[in-house]
Amino acid sequence: MNTSVLVINCGSSSIKYALIDSDPNASRLAGLAERLGSSEACLKGNTSSGKRFTQTLPNADHAEALKAILERLEGRVPGAVGHRIVHGGEHFTQAAMIDDHVIDAIEATAALAPLHNPANLAGIAATQDVFPDLPQVAVFDTAFHQTLPPRAYRYALPEALYTEYGIRRYGFHGTSHAYVSQRAATLSNRGAGGWLTAHLGNGCSTSAIWNNQSLDTSMGLTPLEGLVMGTRSGDVDPGLHAHLHRQLNWSLDEIDNVLNKQSGLLGLSGLTNDMREVEDQALAGHKGAKLALEVFCYRIAKSLAALSCALPQLDGIIFTGGIGENSPTVRRNVLALLPHFRFSVDDVANEATIRGKEGKVDNADHHGPEVWVIPTDEEGRIAMETRHCVETSE
Ligand code: ADP
């Protein structure tokens, strides 16, 4: 097989793409088509020489955007297409070659991810039109967490809600948790032992990983459960929904909108969902920003401590995602709340490990669990899984 993979991540009005060669030193062509379906639709990306481009695509739909992306691949023809699919339910424990059965299964899971799975399916259909001869692979955000045991994935709800409606914890960000934990296992002499991972981006989740298998994670049925995020509340009292409805007469859509779009760092700070600004304003003494930073870090620490129950031993913790990779402050604050785990942070290394740097940021001579910062590579992981899936199906 030609070894380059076109990775596609389709949203309802956007397509993120990356053309990834199996040679890690080859340049990646990557970009984003956004505002599809509107007069402001455009495609932004980079060329192999590192130059940025922006192309307007007024009123383009997904298929037109894909054709424009194809023209930006500089004549490099992918050997396969890997699609990021948000929800695979219980159908998929690993990546799958896309055929009619797989499409039916993604459709059947759409009730669990009504915003994401239909957009992913539209992306598959448009890509099949543009590349009818290329193998296409679905790589699921949920698949890595299918190793969770029932004690971690079941909610304490009547059994029929699980057996008849699939209501359970699924977890997300699977490609990121899988990538960073396997990378740490390779880099560290502890190997694939017990790792806690914290993916902290606009969406945030933690995971407990033993021997390369996910044993628990903070997100649940949907990506709203768990940590405080940019605009998502994370965990709230399940009684909150009924309370808001009864007291404020809010509809389900209003409640959903507030918890997903107006909460998290934005709701607490009253300013922004962007951690850089939260940190700057907290330093300047803004009360809301200080509280947002405090709640954000405390909830991460609390989640990591809770997830440690899933592991027979703790070899280390890994920070990743835009915040995990770039914020020494968040890393320091989180670890300071976990003294009983005996982490020992090297402050100089912690401050210096930003902007895509990978490394261990603990004091080398201590005996407690290690602390790693590993930039995530979800696209690279999707390309790797796609290649593996195509090769094993040949
Ligand atoms: P997404 O989940 O959309 O992929 P990212 O992983 O890029 O998002 O993470 C975005 C978050 O990373 C934002 O909250 C942003 O403020 C934060 N971030 C980026 N750089 C820094 C930095 N230098 N310090 C603190 N936070 C940062």
Image (tube, rainbow, N blue to C red):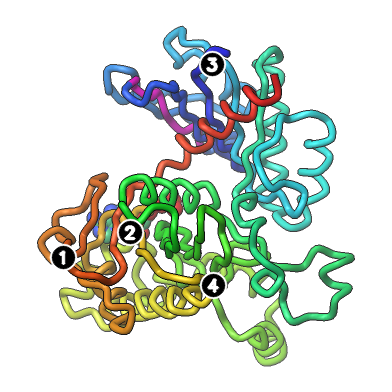
Alpha carbons under labels 4 and 2: distance apart: 22 Å
Secondary structure beneath dot 3 equals: loop
Discs 1/2, front: 1
Instruction: Name the residue beneath numbered marker 2.
Output: 324
Which mark is first along the chain, 2 or 4?
A: 4
Left or right of 339 in this view: 81: right
Instruction: Name the residue beneath numbered marker 4.
Output: 310
Magenta residues span 26-34
Discs 4/1, front: 1
Q: Is residue 263 visible?
A: no
Query: How busy is the neighbourhood of tag 2: few (under 14 within 10 Å), some, or many (20 plus)?
Result: many
The amino acid beneath tag 2 is: Gly
The quadrant in which the C terminus is found is: top right
Q: Where in the image, quadrant-wise, is ligand 1 located?
A: bottom left
Alpha carbons under labels 3 and 2: distance apart: 32 Å
How far from the left and from the top, in percent, is residue 338?
Answer: 32, 80
Our reading of the magenta stretch's main secondary structure is strand
The amino acid beneath tag 3 is: Pro
Instruction: Name the residue beneath numbered marker 1.
Output: 365
Query: How busy is the neighbourhood of tag 1: few (under 14 within 10 Å), some, or many (20 plus)?
Result: few
Secondary structure beneath dot 2 equals: helix
Q: Residue at the spot x=34%, y=61% of the render?
A: 274
Task: Judge by depth and name the residue closer to the eye, 149 or 117.
Answer: 149
Which mark is first along the chain, 2 or 1?
A: 2
Q: Quadrant of residue 111?
A: bottom right
The amino acid beneath tag 4 is: Ala
Discs 4/3, front: 4
Which mark is first along the chain, 2 or 3?
A: 3
Secondary structure beneath dot 4 equals: helix
Which mark is first along the chain, 1 or 3?
A: 3
Task: Judge by depth and name the residue closer to the eye, 322 or 152.
Answer: 152
Which residue is farthest left? 348
